[in-house]
Amino acid sequence: MNRLSKPEDLASLGSASTLQTEATPQSGDSIGKKDFATENSIGNENGASTATSVEEQPSREGTPPPLPPRPKNLQLLDGRPQTSGSLKVSRPSLQSKATTQLSFADTQSYSDESRDTISTDAGKLKSFTHLGKDRIGSDADDSISIKSFAPTIDIGGDAESLLGEVLGDQEKDVIKVLGKQFDGMSGLSISDVLFSEDAQFSQAFEHEFDEIEDMAADGSNEEAIVTQWRSKLKHFLILSSAGKPIYSRHGDDQLITNYTGVVQTLISFYQGMSDVLKSFTAGDVRFVVMSKGPLNLVAITKLVESDAQLRSQLDALYMQILSTLTLPSMERMFANRANYDLRRPLQGTKTLLSALADGFTRGSPSTLLTALECLKLRKSHRQVVNNTLLKTRSENLLYGLIVAGGKLVSVVRPKKHSLHPGDLHLIFNMLFEAGSVKAGGGENWIPLCLPGFNNTGFLYMYVSFLNLDSPTEQVEERPASSHGAKDEVAILLISANKEGFFELREMRDDLVEQLQKNGSIELIRTAVKKGRMSCTDIVPGSPLRHFLYKSRGNVQFTMPSFEPHFTSDLDRRRLLNLYHNLHSNIHTRPTHPKVHHATSTTNISLAWMTPLFELYCVAPITTSRTALAQAANKIIQWVRREEERVFIIGGAVF
Amino acid sequence: MSSKKKVLLKVIILGDSGVGKTSLMNQYVNKKFSASYKATIGADFLTKEVVMDDDRVVTLQLWDTAGQERFQSLGVAFYRGADCCVLVYDVNNSKSFETLESWRDEFLVQASPMDPESFPFVVIGNKVDVEESRRMISSKRAMTFCQSKGGLSYFETSAKEAVNVEEAFSAIAKQALAQEEAGDFNSDFPETIPIDLKNDRDGCAC
Ligand SMILES: Nc1nc2c(ncn2[C@@H]2O[C@H](COP(=O)(O)OP(=O)(O)OP(=O)(O)O)[C@@H](O)[C@H]2O)c(=O)[nH]1
Ligand SMILES: [Mg+2]
């Protein structure tokens, strides 16, 4: 029995310690307010001029873009020595350092925005005011059209002020000693161990996706079930405003119903006082609550995640529900009927919600960054694919997409309608994660609402999975899963026309035939087989183990392969924990640092944000900050060179 | 949630402090009774699966509330979306019977069901095991009250001796299910979005 407002019973949800509501000042998570709907869309017309920049700009392949005029103080910096050898830093000997926020650094410059550039005069933190302004305007920043940029983290003489505490000699000694211990212990060198061992977490994570057994009729196994349920690292609950359960990742009705009652009572208690319960902590568990009309969504986590990050996960779940029902029809269901049981119309949606939920629990760079990943392809090659899509476009086509294993290859869309990353995430989840489309074989016709595009009605999506080896052959069965979802290629043709199946199927046949003829299928196949590059493929000798680079204007990201350092789900989750930390640090600090550094006993990491991009990267602890900064700069340079290969700039527009 | 969806019914139990609301739920769900009194603070929740006459299984989500005034600060939304409301009094306590009407009114105001006239209430007179001499409210008086409120169902129970408890709750489940299904309508399938690609292009300023 769950009894409210008695401390010992609240312990069933963890023991209450802090409650956060809108009225309390510390709840200022402004990021939380930025939901999917306000996030930029790919090729958003009022946003970035990305859609047109392709035509207007001379090809950038090969030739670097011209540098914008740089402010004088930065020209000074340019002349400074670029080697770490110039660093003679004496530091008090510190054994180890906790995550430290360092000085601000934004040596990036871009035309006529130089007032936003912080001079890196040693240690001085200049002009907080413009940083604040910058933050408020950060949504708009995403869409500023900036044709060329040359950002670097300066690692010259100012490295001390830029990157703060550079490892002193003594500290390096400590690490050497530690390294020896590691060697002795496990035969591993210290640089092989990026995360310290946490047996409890590993154990919990290993069983995270295990099904909880059903409650026996006589309730005899209740205790065991409750223990299993509580040991989950993450829960999602969706309930109606009457407290009726709609969805839960773990546990059946018998188990969940009491909790949804408790949660709803908490929520209504605050509503009764004209307040809003947004989040609270109980023990080591964080609860984030999101109320959306007749629904309440709750994320419950023991993982490293900020409220804002959890909110964007809840947003995705909410969008999935709208995608099944549409907003007006869901509202109609609840109108005058608060007791409505939404599980009935949502039948079949559970697998989609759980696929999303598990994606979040495993850790998803795409969700963390609210951005999409593209298949790396030469610009000219992608151009051919784009043109083929345009040429074969049928009359009622709204969007046409070619997708390879969750990565976008090419998009064709009307000038007026951009494609929302949240919508694409739902589609990718359905096709590549939930496996729910498998039943239909190689060809499907799916009515769905894309809430980011329009939450009031349905669109119709024709899906065809390609057999890359003989693409013109109709795939009878979806390609065997032995290849894994990774290299599945799908053609998605979306129309508002209910009767459009045969029209779109014809377009598909035409499209595939043309792509085959002009060699694009072969190029896509090669790119798919190649997979992601490793850090050292990208920058030979790079100390980086992994990185995430988000192009904010394009709402896309690129990253190296998880292999060879992050092969297991657990390794990836720990890597994502680290990214989540960096991400929330750089996004939620009121002071809006441009560079955030973190050091643990086993790794050193960096987050770097400018109006154009976000970069997150990690290296073994044996890497110096200077080397890390250098490596980060090299990634930026690489992305700049490869920009039109790793990102889709504009796509095909009609 | 299991794959076959069981209908979930929200049932709210109201009545003065000490009439035996918690004891009734406990007897019904756990087949247990305790003579010691522990006032409910805020709200308690219990879940019970019920097999209906037609072999359908429904899940009852029982919301047990506090009778003591000082704990009744759960907010308007607490009552929202209930499928049935149970009003409990102690047959040996006339005050607890006289307040039934205000509990009912309170519920209707807070929950504001679509059709208040037909919203299912079940009235329970509890503690009938206590010696007859102490009884204050006769069955006749209670039934007259139920008639005057539009024919509410009435049960006399003992949580202590498990008298009539099953029967009362199975009637509650039946009425809740009927209420849940009453509002069921064939929702129009949402419309396809009217997008005229040609006009869109013409209308585009860029
Ligand atoms: N003899 C007898 N005693 C009962 C019966 N039902 C409950 N009681 C006793 O009455 C007292 C109050 O019972 P509760 O179930 O806690 O009352 P409640 O309505 O939940 O009270 P609040 O939580 O304060 O609103 C307890 O001491 C019970 O043991 C019954 O059927 N017969
Ligand atoms: Mg009670």
Image (cartoon, rainbow, N blue to C red):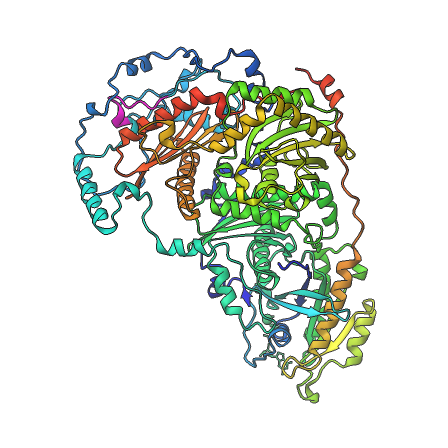
State the predominant SS element of the stretch in magenta: loop
Name the one closer to the observer, A366 or B31. Answer: A366
Residue B91, position as x, y percentages in the image = 70, 79
The image quadrant of residue A574 is top left
The residue sitting at 74% across, 32% down in the picture is A496
Picture residue at 69% right of the left edge, 26% below the top: A510
Q: Nearer the viewer, residue B46 or A231?
A: A231
Region rendered in magenta: A152-161
The residue that appears at 53% across and 23% down in the rendered structure is: A143
Q: Is residue A594 visible?
A: no
Q: Which quadrant is home to the C terminus of chain A?
A: top right
Numbered-mark total:
0
Residue A437: give x, y in percent of width and height.
64, 44
Q: Residue at x 25, y 17 (%)?
A: A80
Q: Nearer the viewer, residue A230 or A438?
A: A438
Q: Nearer the viewer, residue A483 or A210?
A: A483
Q: Is residue A173 left or right of residue A514?
A: left
